[in-house]
Amino acid sequence: MRRLTWFNTTSLTLGFAFLYLPMIILVIYSFNASKLVTVWAGFSTKWYVELFQNEAFLGAAWVTLRVAVISSTFATILGTMAAYVLVRAGRFPGRTLFSGMIYAPLVMPEVITGLSLLLLFIGIGLDRGVLTIVLAHTTFSMCFVSVVVSSRLVSFDQSLEEAALDLGCTPMEAFRLVTLPIIAPAVISGWLLAFTLSLDDLVIASFTAGPSATTLPMKIWSSVRLGVSPQINALSTIMIAIVTIGVISASIISKRATLRQQAEERDAERT
Amino acid sequence: MRRKVLILVPYLWLLALFLIPFAIVFKISLSDTELAIPPYTPTLDLSDGWNGFKEFLSELDFENFEFLTTDDLYWKAYLSSLQIAVISTVLTLFVGYPIAYGMANAPDHWRPTLLMLVILPFWTSFLIRVYSWMGILSTEGYLNQLLLSIGVISEPLTILNTNIAVYIGIVYTYLPFMILPIYSALERLDGSLLEAAEDLGCSRASAFWLVTVPLSKSGIIAGCFLVFIPALGEFVIPSLLGGSKTLMIGKVLFEEFFSNRDWPVASAVAVILLLILIIPIILFQRNEQKQREAEG
């Protein structure tokens, strides 16, 4: 009984207007010529030009990108290992504590995670900078990766792995040739999730970054606290554009993959 | 052997960078503030051996927690965080449910697109999504310009830097967390149950209240926890959209640590926030487990 009544149409229209209007307004006003952000004074791209000449922003963007690539890669490796342990390793001493430590960071307020890591880094005398942000981001995003990957591991047929072992694969080969290709989509989306979380994080980075490293969210934060600024609007527009292109192309790719798979299955049935 | 390595690597990582940091927070919350580097006392000095450890233990006390109970600021911050989190969770439910309902009732070929439209903001920077409301809600912002020009109001409304702006910010940023679980509960709902209810003489409205809402209960509960838990410790939204009167515990902790440099009190604030969060987190886990059992 699927019917698109006037009620459903209205709630969808209003709902998506609410979700998207603020961002659309932001994008439109990033092309505003006036310095007064709320007064429209004609089309201009000067804020983009200023943004690309602003070395503080470019430097922060570079730090953020480095941190995000490194930490999401480590988080994917550690998170996949953790997921494998949770789903496949059976019982071992301290398993409850282990799964607790995987799930707890998902709901932990960022201020607490940030504070506790900062106190640790000071306690062991580690200089704060890019390294400490990477450690912090790896730790909280590996938990997100392991949740994504373990849900894929749970649903896949273990007998495939057993067959590979029976046919003479070493456990490592079985993982590389059988398990990894099957869980690859989850591993990739885990990496993307970790990457986005790292790119996006303000609070944990503020705690764990020293004076030597400033990330883009920290830079945005310190300038928006003073109010709306046209350069930030331009920067936001660029970030929104990248995300939109990324998400739409990812969904097209996965749709094509499903269609191809369906076609292959149909062919297989016919023969 | 290989299994051991596989277990030990993530295990030790989490112990070192998740559990031990918490132990440190807890320990510092029992220490005293001191004008030194690091700004608290006692520090554990193991060179003295067992005696040093005993002395260290004897100097720890609950003074900071007593301080928290005597100073109004902290009580008010905890209570107002709870209040803001509850109100915005309820508001998010009222905004999110109709959207999830509309999505679940949309034609099949629309649904992947609608789902993608809900998830897309999720991947966009949180900070930017909060920031986008600053231009809308400020006194000379777009909302006031619109309302003034159509003559609904004659004086600009003050919304930015009030709790109302904080509610709007939380509803806006956490809306996908509410929509997705409710949508997945509604999508599984068997349409013939509604037909049966209507055949048996229910009006469409009472069929909605008697059949649809109870059957989407697990989604509602999951959505509410997913909004409530992060909203309680929220820092960015009250700092950007709230005013000086907006008290939220995440903001207090941040300021206590960075502006006042009072590490022991900041740690004590963190410990209590954690204690408050444990109850909803356990309830949420139970709800998830119950649902898994119902499915399997």
Image: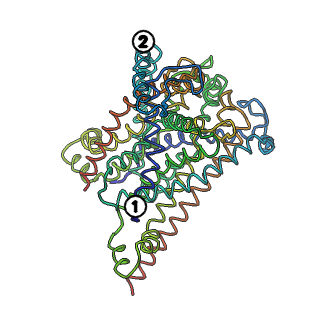
The residue at the point 53 percent across, 36 percent down is: A114
- The circle on residue A152 is 1
Q: Amino acid at mark 2?
A: Thr
State which chain disc 2 sits on: B
State the CA–CA distance, disc 1 to disc 2.
50 Å
A170, above or below B6, in the image: below
Q: Residues within 10 Å of mark 1 (few under 14, many from 20)?
A: some
Q: Secondary structure at mark 2?
A: helix
**Looking at this view, is B7 or A64 the one in front?**
B7
- The circle on residue B35 is none
Residue A3 percent across, percent down from the top left:
37, 51
Residue at the outermost bottom position: A271
Report the side of A198 relative to B2 (left or right). Answer: right
Residue B196 percent across, percent down from the top left:
21, 50
Quarter assignment of residue B154: top right
Q: Which residue is mark 2?
A: B70
Report the side of A25 relative to B64 (left or right). Answer: right
Image quarter in which the C terminus of chain A is found: bottom left
Q: Amino acid at mark 1?
A: Arg
B276, above or below A231, in the image: above
